[in-house]
Image (tube, helix red, strand yellow):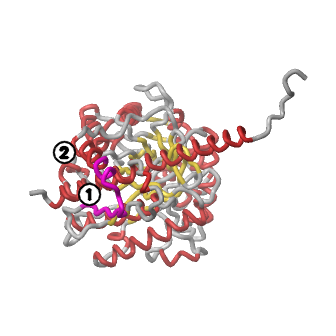
């Protein structure tokens, strides 16, 4: 007897095969046959339901059966090693080698920290290997650790070579496993130093600085940060021999993790800071994409501010992402934190609306790709169950696939956060250890395959369009009257 979850897996693979197989002649005129993925299922064991059009021919069904058998029982090697091309942007979409690129990824802020200790590097390799085997393609992590023991940057311009070699290892291993990296350059919070540490460094040098919000405005502090940006971007990896700014393993740079400036709710401080830092970073590295690290809060003057979860932080999703040099928009979502004491239904309702308004604005206003770079559900929430987390992941993935498959701006996501086994001291409630969370892992893997096959489908459509265009031009040339000089004249 086939289990419900295995039946679901079969259904997903059949649907993928339907999307990707060539249509029969009698099917070419058929409309309404594209796939629709519905998340979340009513039971955790059913991680996806696929619906596709009717009218498939018998011969096509036989072809699909063969394809499904290959998909089910053939080897899955995960994602390919990162190649020599940088991720780019064409319109609303990420592209790689001219073809659409959709990101299904994860956060793992701890990669550099563990990799700086050679005895812990196996956990880094294990996490990246597991991620690759489940076809995850992007990891977001820290390229900062300011002040304190085992810091990357002990003081302005003074770096810990052992920790930097840990980051070298992360970049090298990610490339080996075909995972692209979003590298964040500073924290808005005190963890790992952040704005507060930069301001304290300036105070230690005798500068009269008020609150840590002056990180965004003080010339001395801004100079410290620019020096850090240059140091990281021009770092030559001691394993690969390639400077970070020249390494395609880097998907994008992130200026700051969740910039906030509560002392200036007008948004001017952060707007000016992003403008200045984006221009500076791009003057050093024109190869890579850049994003600001925003959570997605709308500014005070924005008509969409009613979508905010009841507070302002001095950022503006629209204005900040319209800055030249910012290549794509980012979004975070933590309804369990932002709506304390609310029930699951209220949190999911907020999540769906939060995603909808940003997906629409990315498409219609910003005209840039959107990446949901943080979301998750804490196991420390009262009454937590894996079904609740599955429902949240399913809701996010459903919105992403719906937008991506219809040509929208949403290009993927990174859940918070992936961990390897044996990292109990790092657990924050949001961790996902793939081997310990089978239902969530199934949802993640199915979504990875959806996006991968969607990318292949779009690439095939693009190639067909190019061939048809070339054919039309050739036919036009053949039909045109010959204007050359007649022979013998």
Residue 50 in magenta?
yes
Picture residue at 43% right of the left edge, 46% below the top = 456
**Residue corresponding to mark 2:** 422
Relative image position of residue 272 (x, y in whole percent): 63, 58
Q: Residues within 10 Å of mark 2 (few under 14, many from 20)?
A: few
Q: Are marks 1 and 2 in contact (CB under 8 Å)?
A: no
Instruction: Using the image, tell me which numbered label, if any, was put on residue 360.
Output: none
Picture residue at 67% right of the left edge, 41% below the top = 475
Picture residue at 62% right of the left edge, 50% below the top = 325
Relative image position of residue 335 (x, y in whole percent): 36, 70
Residue 13, compared with residue 270, is above or below; it is above
Q: CA distance from mark 1 to mark 2?
A: 35 Å
Range of magenta residues: 47-63
**Disc 2, SS:** loop
Q: Which mark's residue is nearer the viewer, 1 or 2?
A: 1
Q: Name the residue nearer the viewer: 296 or 220.
A: 296
Q: Name the residue nearer the viewer: 76 or 470.
A: 470
Q: Name the residue nearer the viewer: 396 or 487.
A: 487
Query: Can you say which quadrant of the picture contains the N terminus?
Result: bottom left
Query: Can you say which quadrant of the picture contains the C terminus?
Result: top right
Relative image position of residue 311 (x, y in whole percent): 47, 74
Is 185 positioned to the left or the right of 170 in the image? right
Relative image position of residue 77 (x, y in whole percent): 29, 37
Is 275 positioned to the left or the right of 87 in the image? right
Is 357 positioned to the left or the right of 47 in the image? right
Residue 280, compared with residue 26, is above or below; it is above
**Disc 1, SS:** helix
**Residue corresponding to mark 1:** 11
């Amino acid at each position: 007897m086939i289990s419900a979850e295995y039946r679901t897996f079969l259904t997903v693979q059949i649907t993928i095969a339907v999307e990707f197989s060539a249509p029969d002649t009698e099917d070419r005129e058929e409309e309404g046959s594209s796939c629709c993925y519905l998340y979340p299922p009513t039971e955790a064991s059913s991680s996806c339901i696929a619906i596709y059009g009717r009218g498939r021919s018998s011969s096509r069904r036989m072809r699909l059966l063969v394809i499904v058998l290959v998909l089910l029982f053939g080897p899955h090697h995960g994602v390919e090693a990162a190649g020599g091309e940088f991720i780019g942007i064409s319109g609303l979409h990420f592209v790689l080698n001219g073809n659409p690129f959709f990101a299904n990824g994860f956060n793992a802020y701890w990669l550099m920290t563990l990799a700086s200790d050679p005895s812990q590097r196996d956990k880094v390799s294990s996490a990246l290997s597991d991620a690759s085997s489940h076809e995850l393609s992007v990891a977001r992590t820290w390229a900062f650790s300011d002040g304190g023991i085992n810091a990357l940057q002990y003081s302005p311009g003074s770096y810990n070579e052992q920790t930097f070699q840990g980051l070298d290892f992360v970049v090298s291993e990610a490339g080996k496993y075909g995972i692209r990296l979003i590298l964040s350059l500073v924290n808005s919070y005190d963890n790992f130093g952040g704005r507060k540490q930069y301001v304290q460094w300036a105070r230690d040098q005798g500068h009269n600085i008020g609150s840590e919000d002056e990180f965004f405005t003080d010339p001395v502090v801004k100079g410290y940060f620019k020096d850090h940006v240059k140091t990281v971007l021009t770092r030559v990896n001691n394993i690969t021999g390639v400077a970070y700014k020249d390494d395609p393993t880097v998907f994008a740079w992130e200026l700051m993790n969740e910039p906030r400036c509560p002392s200036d709710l007008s948004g001017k401080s952060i707007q000016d800071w992003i403008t200045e830092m984006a221009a500076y970073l791009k003057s050093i590295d024109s190869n890579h994409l850049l994003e600001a690290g925003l959570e997605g809060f709308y500014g005070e003057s924005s008509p969409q501010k009613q979508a905010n979860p009841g507070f302002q932080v001095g950022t503006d999703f629209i204005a900040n992402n319209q800055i030249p040099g910012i290549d794509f928009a980012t979004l975070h979502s933590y309804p369990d934190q932002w709506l304390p004491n609310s029930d699951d239904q209220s949190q999911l309702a907020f999540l769906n609306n939060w995603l909808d308004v940003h997906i629409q604005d990315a498409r219609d206003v910003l005209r840039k790709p959107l990446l949901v770079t943080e979301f998750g559900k804490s196991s420390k929430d009262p009454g937590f169950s894996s079904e609740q987390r599955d429902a949240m992941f399913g809701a996010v993935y459903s919105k992403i696939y719906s937008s991506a498959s219809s040509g929208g701006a949403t290009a993927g996501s990174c859940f918070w956060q992936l961990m390897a086994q044996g990292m109990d001291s790092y657990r924050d409630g949001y961790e996902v250890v793939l081997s310990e969370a089978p239902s969530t892992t199934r949802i993640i893997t199915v979504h990875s395959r959806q996006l991968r096959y969607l990318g292949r489908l779009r690439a095939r459509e693009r190639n067909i369009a190019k061939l048809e265009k070339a054919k039309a031009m050739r036919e036009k040339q053949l039909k045109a009257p010959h204007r050359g000089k007649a022979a013998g004249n």
